[in-house]
Amino acid sequence: MDLGQETAAVVEASTSDGLTVEGIIANNWIIYDENESDWKSHAAAIAQSIHLIKKRLRWKKLIPRLEILSEQLNKPDLWDDPTHAGKISREHGSIMSKMKEVNGFEQELFEHIDMIKLAREENDSELELVGPHFSLSRHESLKALHTLRSNIKEKELEALLAGEQDSCSCFIEVQAGAGGTESMDWASMVMQMYKSWAERRGFGITVVDEMPGELAGIKRATIKVDGEYAFGYAKAEVGAHRLVRISPFDSNKRRHTSFASVAVIPILGDGSTRVQINESDLRIERYRSGGAGGQSVNTTDSAVRITHIPTGVTASCQNERSQHQNKASAMAVLQSRLDQLEMERQAKINAEHTVSLTDINFGSQIRSYVLHPYRMVKDHRTEYEVSDPDSVLEGDLDGFILSFLSASLDKNKDDYL
Amino acid sequence: MKSSCFTRASLSSILQPVFPPRSNPGRPVFCSTAVRPKPRTPLYLRPPAFRATFSELQKWHIWAKNKATSVGPTFSDLDNGPDSALLHRELNWLVEDAVENPNLIRACLDDTAPVWLRACLEELYEVWRQRIEERRPFQYVVGCEHWRDLIVSVEEGVLIPRPETEVIVDLVDDALKRNEELRNGGVWADLGTGSGALAIGIARVLGGRVIATDLSPVAVAVASYNVQRYDLQDKIAVREGSWFDPLKDVEGELSGLVSNPPYIPSKDIDGLQAEVCKHEPRLALDGGANGMNDLLRLCNGAASMLRPGGFFAFETNGETQSKILVDYMDAKMKGSFCNTMIMSDFAGIQRFVTGYRT
Ligand SMILES: C[S@@+](CC[C@H](N)C(=O)[O-])C[C@H]1O[C@@H](n2cnc3c(N)ncnc32)[C@H](O)[C@@H]1O
């Protein structure tokens, strides 16, 4: 293990005359547009980004976490439990690389500032004679700061999705609230919104389970969303979504309020520790089967529901063409649900290391979609709002998702250091 | 509407059933010498050789959806047949199988944009009409059934494998896991193989070989075709003949035996849903007066065909038959079998009888 790198992460970096990221921010240098060639403006923008990224990564918690992990990695019996060891070393590696990256940005920033200051004091032409180390001209340093500034802007976004499961694929589940056909119709609109959103993002979509309403819409449905960071984004949607409109199902044209609740379940990668499911703890049922079954019945409906008896958690699937595949899909949902429960339990145990957002209350109302008497979609957590509900319902959700993710990670008043 | 596209001879991709090398040692002992019926290629495997415009396809789709909707609960009230919701799902699957790029149907294309189909539009109109008006089983319409992780080719004359029967493969798999002796290979048999689904399912969990038999020449042809599609000719031999007749060469040597024989009491058949009683072969369903003729026969045969320690699994009509069968084995055939057990299907119906030859 390279301890040198780890201590480097703890020691606060600065320019040769002692200017730190904090110091730069405290200077309140004016930040101009990116295209202005003003080094102070670039430096201030970069310092702010570094500050934000550290905050999003929960920098202050990363360092002790890294220490704990290093300690565990040094235990001689670590690899007796290869799954655990794998998990530890993966987390360690991922934290190390994040810290290294941010430290790299910091170092680069300070080097360029030093260069520019130096170049101001001395003569550019003289400087070039000093040797390869100092061969960058002031102009080039300025250009480098400009590049760094736009690169680091992208990293800000990436840092929003730095949670342990953020890169996973996921299941999205929509359930109609009370209120019959009107809310079942709303639930199917919400599901459609996520399908379109996932499509736009280039994620793969599979319908796992769908329970249609009697007249219209759905009672509940589950889709699988495949792709990098599907969970990281979609987790921002967990909660109750409220619709206000004149119901097309009400002959008296009255205004109705309906709810649909959304749950998002990460699908852990193979490397993660997953809950062991005992076959004997499962009750597997084929539902809506036609009476006698067997040779007497030919139905293409081979829906399967699995109940995990100890926890009461259930999962069902009816969209595959064979019972076997319905069972396999339902098992995958069940596994992910149980994994999520377990993660929540673990998260409660070491509460100080909750990088994920598992503490969200599934019932709490997160967003309103008003179609009447005015038109607007408003997120109650961030106050982010949009006046065109149609575009949102067509899957234009990124504004809501990113504003929520940044709000929930950036609001932390306590500083990162 | 009757157009040339129904002359199936034009479908060049139809495959001739090929006899597995091992079951055809030059002189076909148990195989009838009559010309084998040619199995039909499932729709999803046919080439997308038919062109239609997007608007023509849309028009068909809307027509087909309306037809599905018009059924409402009629069939399910009448004889437990499919309701509209189920028919809509089947229609999605038909699109999945028939259209080269099924996602197109939800896209907004130009009316005149071309779409490629695996059957001509006239045929799609005709088969969906048959599905609704004649209650022709969906699986015959598309020529296949998804069964476990397999897609089994089926056609008129062959029973469509049922989801319940999928469990027999798990029962065999469990038996293999528990019993080391069974894992050492040996020959297994699937009697009354129909489409060959069960034989293929168990061949894939077994180390050894499987002999699949059926009395019906259509079943033998379709089973052979499926075996070939899954490239299992070296493991599965399909033989034509009644129950154990084609198995004389392995008497007393079978390591395992599975069967889903006809078990419906004769008098019940006409009351079944139209898809079953009007379209599936009676030979595959009719188990005699109380439905147990073939089960009892298989039971007797199993005693002489299985080697000591050999495993068997039979599917039955449910609790009553399972109990009769177990009683018969434990009392009338005392000493022949051990560890006889009744296992339930996913709907909780006592569906299977398993055990070992002593
Ligand atoms: C209920 S089907 C089962 C088909 C297939 N094993 C399955 O599970 O899908 C019964 C099969 O037994 C065959 N059968 C009926 N009488 C038979 C006999 N005497 N000898 C061999 N097979 C017979 C039928 O042709 C039919 O394929």
Image: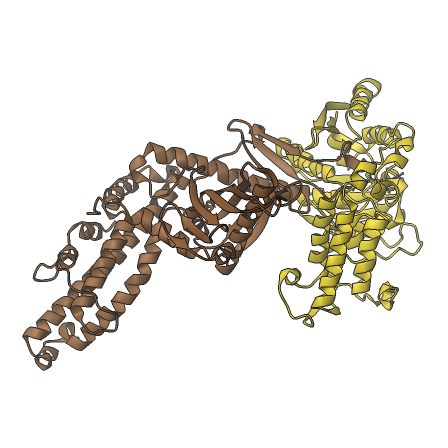
Residue at the limit of the structure toward the top, as seen here:
B331
Decide if residue A20 is in sight here: yes
Residue B6 at x, y percent in the picture: 86, 63
Residue at the limit of the structure toward the right, as seen here:
B34
| Left or right, residue A410 beside residue A186 | left
Q: Determine the image quadrant of residue B120.
A: bottom right
Q: Nearer the viewer, residue A281 or B178?
A: A281
Residue B73 at x, y percent in the picture: 77, 40
Decide if residue B155 is in sight here: no
Q: Determine the image quadrant of residue A221.
A: top right
Q: How many marks?
A: 0
Identify the residue at image location x=83%, y=36%: B251
Q: Nearer the viewer, residue B45 or B6?
A: B6
| Left or right, residue A49 beside residue A134 | right
Q: Determine the image quadrant of residue B35.
A: bottom right
Q: Ligand 1 appears in which quadrant?
A: top right
| Left or right, residue B218 beside residue A247 | right
| Left or right, residue B286 beside residue A64 | right
Identify the residue at image location x=31%, y=57%: A156
What scheme was used to colour the molecule?
by chain
Identify the residue at image location x=36%, y=40%: A79
Identify the residue at image location x=45%, y=37%: A363
Residue B171 at x, y percent in the picture: 68, 34
Residue B46 in the image: above or below residue B163 = below
The colour of chain B is yellow
Residue at the limit of the structure toward the front, as seen here:
A252
Residue at the limit of the structure toward the bottom, as seen here:
A125
The colour of chain A is brown
Residue A9 at x, y percent in the picture: 20, 51
